[in-house]
Amino acid sequence: MTKETRWLDEDEQTAWRHYLRASRALSLALDRELLDHGMSLAEYEILSMLSEAEGRRLRMGALADLVVQSRSRITHTATRLQRRGWVTRESCSSDSRGVELVLTDGGYDALLLAAPVHVASVRRYFVDTMDGDQLSIVGDGMRRVHEQVGGEGG
């Protein structure tokens, strides 16, 4: 027995399509501006998460969960970052089967150079397009969506 499909009404369809287009355009814009400074948005996000972690290190699986990427994609990105000397891979001290990605001083320096570009882009394309109430509503709504699809953390 199948349930009847709850089709989107016109307002819901409009909101959904605005979200799709905006999220893709925003990712492309943020990526483009970082690429002009030597790294992709995916690379920036990984370096950023490592910089905030204790000891500037995270297990590869935990990092994949944080940045909502597959373990395979994290592995490929980590390889690019390792070639540049921005990260190293080390055995996990608490579990020898695990691998941690560790941010190097060179990676931290690269992140510090890219951070002002990224923050200015986020502000220009996202934060400054809304007033405080709108930003709070969007943030809360996206947190709820993330939780609904099984995301963890803040």
Image (spheres, rainbow, N blue to C red):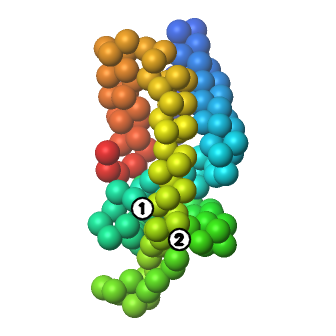
Residue drawn at (53%, 71%) of the image = 87
Residue where numbered disc 1 is placed:
50
Side of 83 where 88 appears, left or right: left
Picture coordinates of residue 78, whole percent (x, y): 59, 68
Picture coordinates of residue 138, whole percent (x, y): 39, 23
Residue 60 visible in the displayed image:
no
Kindly identify which numbered label has been placed on residue 82.
none
Q: Quadrant of the C terminus?
A: top left
Q: Is residue 109 above or below residue 88?
A: above
Residue 21 visible in the displayed image:
yes
Image quadrant in which you'd find residue 8 = top right
Kindly identify which numbered label has been placed on residue 87.
2
- The furthest residue to the bottom: 96
**Element under disc 1:** helix
**Element under disc 2:** strand
**How many marks are shown on the rendered structure?**
2
Residue drawn at (45%, 53%) of the image = 48
Residue drawn at (51%, 30%) of the image = 120
Picture coordinates of residue 65, whole percent (x, y): 44, 58
In-front residue for pair 137/123 = 123
**As shown in the figure, which amino acid type bears the numbered disc 1?**
Leu
Residue drawn at (41%, 41%) of the image = 146
Q: Badge 2 local density, few (<14 within 10 Å), some, or many (20+)?
A: many
- The furthest residue to the top: 10
Side of 79 where 121 appears, left or right: left
How many angstroms separate mark 1 from mark 2 (CA)? Answer: 9 Å
**As shown in the figure, which amino acid type bears the numbered disc 2?**
Val
Picture coordinates of residue 24, whole percent (x, y): 64, 32
In-front residue for pair 145/41 = 41
Q: Would you say the residues marked 1 and 2 are in contact, meaning their CB atoms lie under 8 Å apart?
A: yes
Sequence-wise, the earlier of marks 1 and 2 is 1
Q: Badge 1 local density, few (<14 within 10 Å), some, or many (20+)?
A: many
